[in-house]
Structure formats: C-alpha cells, structure tokens
Amino acid sequence: MIYLLRHGETVWNRAGRFQGQGDAPLTAEGVAQARAMGRRLAQEELAGARLISSPLYRAWQSAVLVAEALSLDPHTIEFEPRLMEVSFGDWEGLTREEIKANDLDKWRARKADIWNHAPPGGESFAQTEVRVEDWLNAHRDKEPLIAVSHGLTSRVLRGLYLGIRGPDVLRYSVRQTELYRLSGGQVETLPTELAEFDEFA
C-alpha cells in the first residue's frame, strides 16, 4: 500500500513558475497543507509505515511536517531520487509567458508532442515514466509506504499503478489539499479538511 502525497504550495507555485527539479520553499499555505495531509494520514492504519521523500527541498520540507503530525522522527525520512519532479531544464523558474517570449519555437515543439519532447536541458514525460516505474515495481503492494513527491510525477505514478501510460495521465488531479491511497490495484483520493476551501475543487 502506498500513500502518495504532493508537497504543499510553494512560492513558485503561487507565482506560476515552472519548478521541475529547481526549488522554492513552501508558502504559509503550503505549510498548512502539508500539516493537513499529516493529520489525514493519522486516521489511517500506518503501523510500521516508512516515510519516503523526493530529495527536493519542498518535498522534504513537506515530509518533515507530515512526520511531525504522525509523531515520527524526521531523521527516519528516506530520500528517493526516482520520486523527483520532471525536469524542465532551462525553463525552471520561468513562467509560461517568459518561456513563450524567449523560446517560442521550442515551446511549440513540446506542445506538439508533450509526452516525448523534453524541454531544453530537461526531461520528457516518457523518460520520467521509466524511472517512476522502476521505483513502483520495487514497492507495489508491499509494506505500507508514505511517499512525498510532486504533481507531475504523482500523475505518472498513479497512471502506472492503474496500468495507464501516456499523456492521458496528465489530466489527473494534483491538488495540494488531497492525497492518494494506492492499494489493491485501485487509487483512492483522500481529501484533507482543507479540500472544502480549495478554489479548484
């Protein structure tokens, strides 16, 4: 069983900037979201569950807050590079408008084949799928895990768990007011108490 979380809102999320494997700290709202995810997890049967996090700062920061809510030692958090976000290479830290203004041809090329075309210096979704599948195959339906990852990586991982590949997974929700339970070949959405206030819900 895997409980899959996205990190809380970051400064770059709020500003509409591509994060990828670049980084930005959580906002005050993001801290509240991570704590709410921890409280929601505390309602589950998690005896012996391992807490695993992408090594990117925003995911680790969220994992620490989850650990505190579960009365776990933050020093036991395990880092897993395969759970890192899709790399946007040269576009990290930029808004869509900035990318279009400076790199329109490459933006259009990627939009024409969003699954297979990587941003300059970055990673395609097809490449991400390979590393995420490698991790999932090692942990599917074994001991309970809490995995703190990222929006796009979460979509790919949930798709793989359901046996779905390719760009259709990009339509999946990645709200920071919910988490996901992957068990028995199914993916269940677990809303936190903040979900009712989520303007995108």
Image (tube, rainbow, N blue to C red):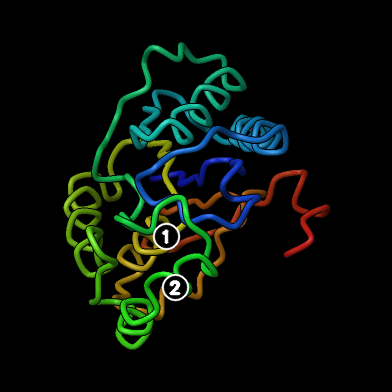
Left/right placement of residue 15 relative to residue 135 reads right
Residue density around tag 1, few if under 14, some if 14–19, many if 20 or more, within 10 Å:
many
Quadrant in the rendering for residue 164: bottom left
Q: Residues at badges 1 and 2 in contact (C-beta under 8 Å)? A: yes
Left/right placement of residue 151 relative to residue 173 reads left
Q: Position of residue 8 (x, y in %)?
A: 59, 41
Residue density around tag 2, few if under 14, some if 14–19, many if 20 or more, within 10 Å:
some
Element on which disc 1 rests? helix
Q: Which residue is mark 2?
A: 170
Element on which disc 2 rests? helix
Instruction: Indicate whether 128 appears above or below 164.
Output: above
Q: Quadrant of the N terminus?
A: top left
Q: Amino acid at mark 2?
A: Leu
Q: Position of residue 151 (x, y in %)?
A: 47, 55
In this view, which residue lies farthest toward the front? 102
**What is the number of callouts on the image?**
2
The numbered mark at residue 141 is none
Q: Which residue is mark 1?
A: 152
Q: Position of residue 177 (x, y in %)?
A: 67, 49
Q: Quadrant of the C terminus?
A: bottom right
Decide which of 48, 14 is in the foreground and name it: 14
In this view, which residue lies farthest toward the bottom? 112
Earlier-in-chain disc, 1 versus 2: 1
Decide which of 9, 77 is in the foreground and name it: 9
Decide which of 81, 120 is in the foreground and name it: 120
